Image (spheres, rainbow, N blue to C red):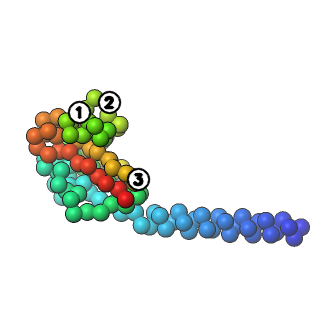
């Protein structure tokens, strides 16, 4: 009987520890409005230049879904604004995306806006 209480206590301690670690990660995450007040719009490509992002941060893309969509692409498709074979396409006009460590690439679904008007955004997450 004493061993059962000991195991229960150990399980409770482990659960509390896991909750603490999980809560700490959530508390550290920040939410960013991509493009600030202008949202996902022309010339957004320099928006992230002075920002430092970390694992678990959320990015809110606000835009008019009647005009374009947000497309997550592979690194090799970013510079050419290639829309073939996207990783993901966001269409709501108010998309929240949680990103994890690595380099992520987003472009406009309107190739001309991407290529000529800077609607492309690389995001480095540390």
In which quadrant is the N terminus drawn?
bottom right
In the displayed structure, would residue 74 be above or below residue 101? above
Tag on residue 82? Answer: 1
Outermost residue, left side: 116
Does dot 3 land on a helix, a strand or a loop?
A: loop
Structural distance between the alpha carbons of marks 3 and 1 = 23 Å
Rendering coords of residue 4 (x, y %): 84, 65
Q: Please tell me which residue is depicted at 46% across the width and 63% down the height of the picture.
A: 26
Examine the rendering and report whether any part of residue 72 can be seen. yes
**Residue 97 placement, left or right of 44:** right
> Residue 79: where, in percent of width, then height?
20, 40
| Label 3 with label 2: CB-CB less than 8 Å | no
Quarter of the picture holding the C terminus: bottom left
Q: Which residue does the numbered mark 3 point to in the structure image? A: 100
Say which residue label 2 marks: 85
For the residue carrying disc 1, how many other residues have a C-alpha within 10 Å: few (<14), some (14-19), or many (20+)? Answer: some
Residue at point 24% right, 40% down?
78
Residue at 29 percent of width and 59 percent of height? 32
């Amino acid at each position: 009987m004493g061993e059962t209480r000991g195991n229960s206590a150990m399980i409770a301690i482990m659960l509390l520890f896991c909750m603490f670690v999980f809560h700490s990660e959530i508390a550290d995450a920040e939410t960013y409005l991509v493009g600030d007040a202008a949202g996902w719009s022309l010339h957004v490509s320099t928006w992230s230049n002075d920002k430092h992002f970390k694992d678990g941060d959320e990015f809110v893309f606000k835009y008019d879904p009647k005009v374009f969509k947000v497309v997550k692409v592979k690194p090799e498709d970013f510079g050419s604004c290639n829309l073939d074979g996207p990783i993901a396409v966001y269409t709501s006009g108010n998309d929240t995306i949680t990103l994890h460590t690595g380099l992520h690439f987003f472009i406009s679904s309107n190739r001309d806006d991407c290529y000529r008007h800077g609607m492309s955004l690389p995001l480095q997450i540390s």
